[in-house]
Amino acid sequence: MRLHRNLVGSFVFVCLSVLGNAQQPSLKDAYNGCFLVGAALNPAQFTGQDAEETAIVKAQFNTISPENVLEWGPIHPQPHTYNFGLADQYVEFGQQNHMFIVGHTLIWHNQTPKWVFQDEKGNPVSRKVLLKRMREHIKTVVGRYKGRINAWDVVNEVVDEDGTLRQTPWLKIIGPDYIEKAFEYAHKADPKAQLNYNDYNLENEAKRKGALELVRKLKTKGVHITGVGLQDHFSLDFATADQINATIEELGKLGMKVMITELDVDVLPSPFQDPTADVSVKVASNPKYNPYASGLPEAVQQQITNRWADLFRIYSSHCGVVTRVTLWGVSDKDSWKNDWPIRGRTNYPLLFDRNAQPKPALNAVIEAAPKKPS
Ligand code: XIL
């Protein structure tokens, strides 16, 4: 009997700690009516292999993004090879749980195999060949998930810090119209899917101006663009409330929906002078950049908690323009921020800790939600 009671007690404890306090609404419920709340998933989370994190995803989120499985590299590694296995499982997980499913990403300069841009001799292909490859890839991938993937990041990180178009093989080989072509092919493959441009650092004025200019041009040309995804890989002090508000407002004025697509809050010292989320940049390991390897001081935990609540207050002051807020991961243990830009650090960028337990910031975010009329 005693053993039985202990077992029941531990079961209730586990449920409460995984799913949050029974009285407390989940993230998705707290922001219901304002925006969807989501997370980027790795395969262990959508196949159920990591049962604890899968339970968090089901309890807390109503939209999901794939951390890697829909990128060109994993899904289309060779000219005639597509690996749909994991992407199919990702989409099935989202459908079974009635979630808004995001496709990330169709056209990017990173995580794209070299063969895409080269002929058999290793020379750059022509505009015509690259457009054909782009069309075939988009038609195949978007077509396969037509009506099931609800929104695509059609182009990722196409604007540079100074506001000009980023110099990528896509731009150099095809020319600036590669962006509208990508949207055109995606729209053709699934006319009902939401189609977005996704980028980081649009909170910085020069880059934002370039992004706004790009959106204006696309709209003038009649391109089917739904909105702009702000990655929002932030730190405790970047970006400021003014920068975030200005970015959302200016995009909103152009008729764009705004999605926060990759939110996390980096608490470790940055090796960079200016903030970046450029995954191709790598920095050598150095203990001075990893100060919290054996735990987080209470004062920093408090700063994190306040920062998260402030961010959600800002986003929810733009209900209607901001339609989705997605965190780039579920718990601190799996976050890419442990290995980028420096490998093997101990970072604390999400709302669940390394043991998949809710951090004080989770509660603070839920409490920061706009109060619903009772
Ligand atoms: C990251 C993933 O989280 C890592 O697993 C991967 O190794 C590198 O890319 N901008 C994006 C995301 O659009 O796809 C990146 O994700 C983070 C920066």
Image: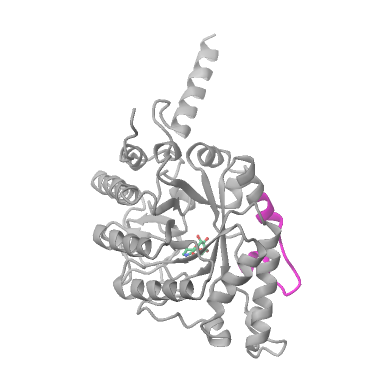
Residue at horizontal 46 percent and vertical 41 percent from the top:
356
Residue at horizontal 54 percent and vertical 37 percent from the top:
55
Q: Residue furthest right?
A: 80
- Out of 358 and 306, give the one closest to the viewer: 306
Residue 302 horizontal side relative to residue 341, left or right: left
- Out of 366 and 289, give the one closest to the viewer: 366
Residue 51 horizontal side relative to residue 35, left or right: right
- Out of 352 and 369, give the one closest to the viewer: 369
- Out of 333 and 119, give the one closest to the viewer: 119
The magenta segment: 72-89
Image quarter of residue 289: bottom left
Residue 98 screen position, x and y as percent? 59, 41
**How is the structure coloured here?**
one colour
Is the residue 84 above or below the residue 109 in the image? Answer: above
Image quarter of residue 240: bottom left
Residue 230 screen position, x and y as percent? 41, 61
Is the residue 86 above or below the residue 373 in the image? Answer: below
Residue at horizontal 58 percent and vertical 53 percent from the top:
150
Q: Residue furthest top?
A: 1
Q: Quadrant of the N terminus?
A: top right
Q: Would residue 171 be counted in the magenta stretch?
A: no
Q: Quadrant of the C terminus?
A: top left
Is the residue 120 above or below the residue 334 in the image? Answer: below
Residue 23 horizontal side relative to residue 197, left or right: left
Residue 116 seen: yes
Residue 209 screen position, x and y as percent? 34, 74
